[in-house]
Amino acid sequence: MRALGMITIVSIKVAVEKIVSLTLIVNGHNMETIIFIIAVKAFFVAMKKEETLLLSESELAQTRLLGKRLSRLRLARRVRQEDAAVRAGLSRPTARKIEHGDPGRTLGQVLRYLGAVAPGMTLQQLLEGKDPSLLALEASEKRQRVRELSAAERDKLDF
Protein backbone atom coordinates (compact mmCIF):
# COMPACT_ATOMS: atom_id res chain seq x y z
CA MET A 1 0.00 0.00 0.00
CA ARG A 2 2.76 2.44 0.89
CA ALA A 3 4.46 1.85 -2.49
CA LEU A 4 1.29 2.83 -4.32
CA GLY A 5 1.04 5.99 -2.19
CA MET A 6 4.64 6.89 -2.96
CA ILE A 7 4.02 6.40 -6.69
CA THR A 8 1.10 8.84 -6.49
CA ILE A 9 3.22 11.41 -4.64
CA VAL A 10 6.14 10.99 -7.04
CA SER A 11 3.89 11.30 -10.11
CA ILE A 12 2.32 14.48 -8.72
CA LYS A 13 5.76 15.93 -8.00
CA VAL A 14 6.89 15.13 -11.56
CA ALA A 15 3.76 16.80 -12.93
CA VAL A 16 4.43 19.86 -10.77
CA GLU A 17 8.02 20.05 -12.01
CA LYS A 18 6.91 19.85 -15.64
CA ILE A 19 4.27 22.51 -15.15
CA VAL A 20 6.67 24.77 -13.27
CA SER A 21 9.15 24.54 -16.14
CA LEU A 22 6.73 26.63 -18.22
CA THR A 23 7.63 30.30 -18.08
CA LEU A 24 4.79 32.29 -19.56
CA ILE A 25 3.72 35.75 -18.51
CA VAL A 26 -0.05 36.35 -18.32
CA ASN A 27 -1.41 39.78 -17.35
CA GLY A 28 1.85 40.76 -15.73
CA HIS A 29 1.89 37.68 -13.46
CA ASN A 30 4.46 34.98 -13.74
CA MET A 31 2.55 31.97 -15.10
CA GLU A 32 5.10 29.70 -13.45
CA THR A 33 4.02 30.94 -10.01
CA ILE A 34 0.32 30.63 -10.77
CA ILE A 35 0.65 27.10 -12.09
CA PHE A 36 2.84 26.13 -9.15
CA ILE A 37 0.20 27.32 -6.67
CA ILE A 38 -2.51 25.39 -8.51
CA ALA A 39 -0.34 22.27 -8.62
CA VAL A 40 0.48 22.45 -4.90
CA LYS A 41 -3.20 22.84 -4.09
CA ALA A 42 -4.03 19.81 -6.26
CA PHE A 43 -1.26 17.87 -4.54
CA PHE A 44 -2.73 18.48 -1.07
CA VAL A 45 -6.27 17.72 -2.23
CA ALA A 46 -5.02 14.43 -3.71
CA MET A 47 -3.23 13.59 -0.46
CA LYS A 48 -6.40 14.16 1.57
CA LYS A 49 -8.46 11.95 -0.71
CA GLU A 50 -5.78 9.24 -0.91
CA GLU A 51 -5.13 8.98 2.83
CA THR A 52 -5.74 5.23 2.74
CA LEU A 53 -2.72 4.83 0.46
CA LEU A 54 -0.44 6.29 3.10
CA LEU A 55 -1.55 4.06 5.99
CA SER A 56 -0.56 0.50 6.81
CA GLU A 57 -3.18 -2.22 7.20
CA SER A 58 -2.93 -2.10 11.01
CA GLU A 59 -3.45 1.67 10.98
CA LEU A 60 -6.48 1.29 8.70
CA ALA A 61 -7.83 -1.38 11.05
CA GLN A 62 -7.56 1.11 13.92
CA THR A 63 -9.55 3.74 12.04
CA ARG A 64 -12.23 1.16 11.21
CA LEU A 65 -12.36 0.08 14.88
CA LEU A 66 -12.84 3.67 16.01
CA GLY A 67 -15.63 4.12 13.47
CA LYS A 68 -17.31 0.89 14.54
CA ARG A 69 -17.18 1.90 18.20
CA LEU A 70 -18.75 5.27 17.39
CA SER A 71 -21.45 3.58 15.33
CA ARG A 72 -22.28 1.08 18.08
CA LEU A 73 -22.37 3.84 20.69
CA ARG A 74 -24.81 5.80 18.53
CA LEU A 75 -27.01 2.73 18.13
CA ALA A 76 -26.82 1.92 21.85
CA ARG A 77 -27.90 5.45 22.70
CA ARG A 78 -30.64 5.28 20.05
CA VAL A 79 -29.52 8.41 18.21
CA ARG A 80 -30.20 8.66 14.50
CA GLN A 81 -27.14 9.24 12.35
CA GLU A 82 -28.69 12.32 10.81
CA ASP A 83 -29.47 13.85 14.23
CA ALA A 84 -25.92 13.21 15.47
CA ALA A 85 -24.50 14.77 12.32
CA VAL A 86 -26.62 17.91 12.72
CA ARG A 87 -25.63 18.26 16.39
CA ALA A 88 -21.96 17.90 15.43
CA GLY A 89 -22.25 20.40 12.59
CA LEU A 90 -21.45 17.76 9.97
CA SER A 91 -23.21 16.45 6.90
CA ARG A 92 -24.75 12.99 7.04
CA PRO A 93 -22.27 11.62 4.45
CA THR A 94 -19.40 12.83 6.66
CA ALA A 95 -20.99 11.11 9.67
CA ARG A 96 -21.24 7.91 7.61
CA LYS A 97 -17.56 8.21 6.66
CA ILE A 98 -16.61 8.65 10.32
CA GLU A 99 -18.59 5.55 11.27
CA HIS A 100 -16.91 3.56 8.49
CA GLY A 101 -13.48 4.61 9.74
CA ASP A 102 -12.47 6.90 6.89
CA PRO A 103 -8.93 8.06 7.75
CA GLY A 104 -9.44 11.30 5.82
CA ARG A 105 -11.75 12.71 8.50
CA THR A 106 -10.16 15.12 10.95
CA LEU A 107 -9.77 14.45 14.64
CA GLY A 108 -11.93 17.51 15.30
CA GLN A 109 -14.77 16.02 13.26
CA VAL A 110 -14.51 12.72 15.12
CA LEU A 111 -14.51 14.43 18.52
CA ARG A 112 -17.47 16.67 17.60
CA TYR A 113 -19.38 13.58 16.42
CA LEU A 114 -18.56 11.76 19.66
CA GLY A 115 -19.78 14.78 21.64
CA ALA A 116 -23.01 14.82 19.65
CA VAL A 117 -23.67 11.14 20.29
CA ALA A 118 -22.53 11.04 23.93
CA PRO A 119 -22.02 14.49 25.47
CA GLY A 120 -19.17 14.52 27.97
CA MET A 121 -17.67 11.21 26.83
CA THR A 122 -13.96 11.18 26.05
CA LEU A 123 -12.24 9.26 23.30
CA GLN A 124 -10.55 7.10 25.93
CA GLN A 125 -13.91 6.17 27.47
CA LEU A 126 -15.22 5.27 24.01
CA LEU A 127 -12.26 2.99 23.34
CA GLU A 128 -12.60 1.32 26.75
CA GLY A 129 -16.22 0.45 25.87
CA LYS A 130 -17.55 0.62 29.42
CA ASP A 131 -20.51 2.90 28.69
CA PRO A 132 -23.70 1.50 30.29
CA SER A 133 -25.65 1.84 27.05
CA LEU A 134 -22.97 -0.16 25.19
CA LEU A 135 -23.01 -2.86 27.86
CA ALA A 136 -26.82 -3.06 27.63
CA LEU A 137 -26.62 -3.38 23.83
CA GLU A 138 -24.05 -6.18 24.09
CA ALA A 139 -26.18 -7.99 26.68
CA SER A 140 -29.26 -7.80 24.45
CA GLU A 141 -27.27 -9.20 21.50
CA LYS A 142 -25.88 -12.20 23.36
CA ARG A 143 -27.46 -15.52 22.60
CA GLN A 144 -29.01 -17.21 25.58
CA ARG A 145 -29.27 -20.91 25.97
CA VAL A 146 -32.69 -22.32 26.57
CA ARG A 147 -32.83 -24.79 29.38
CA GLU A 148 -34.96 -27.87 29.19
CA LEU A 149 -38.26 -27.66 31.04
CA SER A 150 -38.74 -29.81 34.11
CA ALA A 151 -41.53 -32.40 34.15
CA ALA A 152 -43.65 -30.19 36.39
CA GLU A 153 -43.20 -27.22 34.05
CA ARG A 154 -44.13 -29.35 31.00
CA ASP A 155 -47.24 -30.64 32.78
CA LYS A 156 -48.20 -27.11 33.70
CA LEU A 157 -47.94 -26.05 30.03
CA ASP A 158 -49.82 -29.19 28.97
CA PHE A 159 -47.21 -30.55 26.55
Image (cartoon, rainbow, N blue to C red):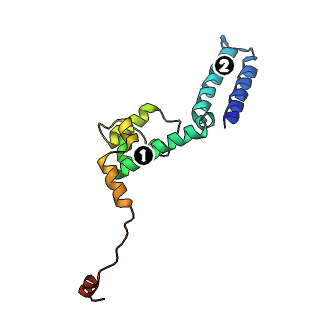
Report the residue at 70% width, 15% height from top: 32
Please state which of residues 31 and 136 is positioned toward the viewer in this rendering.
Answer: 136
Residue, disc 2: 36
The tag earlier along the polypeptide, 2 or 1, is 2
Q: Secondary structure at mark 1?
A: helix
Could you tell whether 99 is left or right of 30 in the image?
A: left
Report whether residue 77 is seen: no
Label of residue 15 in the image = none
Q: Quadrant of residue 88?
A: top left
Report the residue at 41% width, 39% height from top: 90
Q: Amino acid at mark 1?
A: Arg
Q: Quadrant of the C terminus?
A: bottom left
Q: Quadrant of residue 30?
A: top right
Residue, disc 1: 69
Image location (x, y in percent) of residue 7 = 72, 32
Image location (x, y in percent) of residue 95 = 44, 43
Q: Is residue 6 above or below residue 131?
A: above
Report the residue at 34% width, 38% height from top: 115
Most extreme residue toward the front, as rendered? 151
Q: Are marks 2 and 1 in contact (CB under 8 Å)?
A: no
Image location (x, y in percent) of residue 124 = 38, 36
Q: CA distance from mark 2 to mark 1?
A: 42 Å
Please state which of residues 61 and 152 is positioned toward the viewer in this rendering.
Answer: 152
Most extreme residue toward the top, as rendered? 28
Q: Secondary structure at mark 2?
A: helix
